[in-house]
Image (tube, helix red, strand yellow):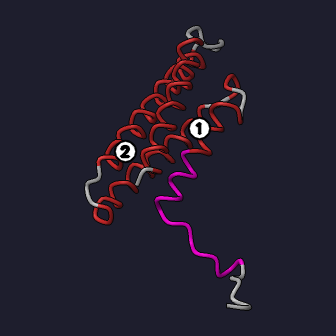
């Protein structure tokens, strides 16, 4: 139909599922190459952890809509594991700050970031399968 192009304000709103896929991709990019991993602060990790907690709760709210799809449950498990890796990284950073020195277990810190990013990618792929 002529003249039926939607104006930006009329574009369809992003679904919760699309929003979580986008947020997981953005967080993964931030961890892997968006920020210098040596310069991630506890406050940044706390914000990321809260974001992942929101996604976990959001997936719970999607279950009545989509049913108990295996990929939805797998996505939630992957997000929970990613959050756990962020918490491990935060603990390592916090311990190093208490001792007023760089993290002595820096390899474990960077491993936690990498494992978190891997779980975020898994979660994103599971959500894309829905």
Q: Is residue 25 above or below residue 40?
A: below
Distance, label 1 to label 2, CA atoms, is 15 Å
Give the SS element for disc 2. Answer: helix
- Tell me the residue that label 1 is attached to: 28
- Total marks shown come to 2
Asked if disc 1 and disc 2 are in contact, CB closer than 8 Å, the reply is no
Q: Nearer the viewer, residue 31 or 95?
A: 31
36 vs 78, nearest the viewer: 78
Q: Position of residue 66 (x, y in %)?
A: 32, 62
Considering the whole magenta stretch, tell me its main secondary structure.
Answer: helix
- Answer left or right for 64 relative to 98: left
Dot 2 alpha-carbon crowd within 10 angstroms: few under 14, some 14 to 19, many 20 or more: many
- As displayed, is residue 88 above or below residue 56? above
Give the quadrant of the C terminus.
bottom left
The residue carrying mark 2 is 76
Residue range corresponding to the magenta coloring: 8-24
Residue 12: % across, % down:
58, 75
**Looking at the image, which residue sits at the far front?**
1
Q: Which of the 4 image quadrants contains residue 78?
A: top left
């Amino acid at each position: 139909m002529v003249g039926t192009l939607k104006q930006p304000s009329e574009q369809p709103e992003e679904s919760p599922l699309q929003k979580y896929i986008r947020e997981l991709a953005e967080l993964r990019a931030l961890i892997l190459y968006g920020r210098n991993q040596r310069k991630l602060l506890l406050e940044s990790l706390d914000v990321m952890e809260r974001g992942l907690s929101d996604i976990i709760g959001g997936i719970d709210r999607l279950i009545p809509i989509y049913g108990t799809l295996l990929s939805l449950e797998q996505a939630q498990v992957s997000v929970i594991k990613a959050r756990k890796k962020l918490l491990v990284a935060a603990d390592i950073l916090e311990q190093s700050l208490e001792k007023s020195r760089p993290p002595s277990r820096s390899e474990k810190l960077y491993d936690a970031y990498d494992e978190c990013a891997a779980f975020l990618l898994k979660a994103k792929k599971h959500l894309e399968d829905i």
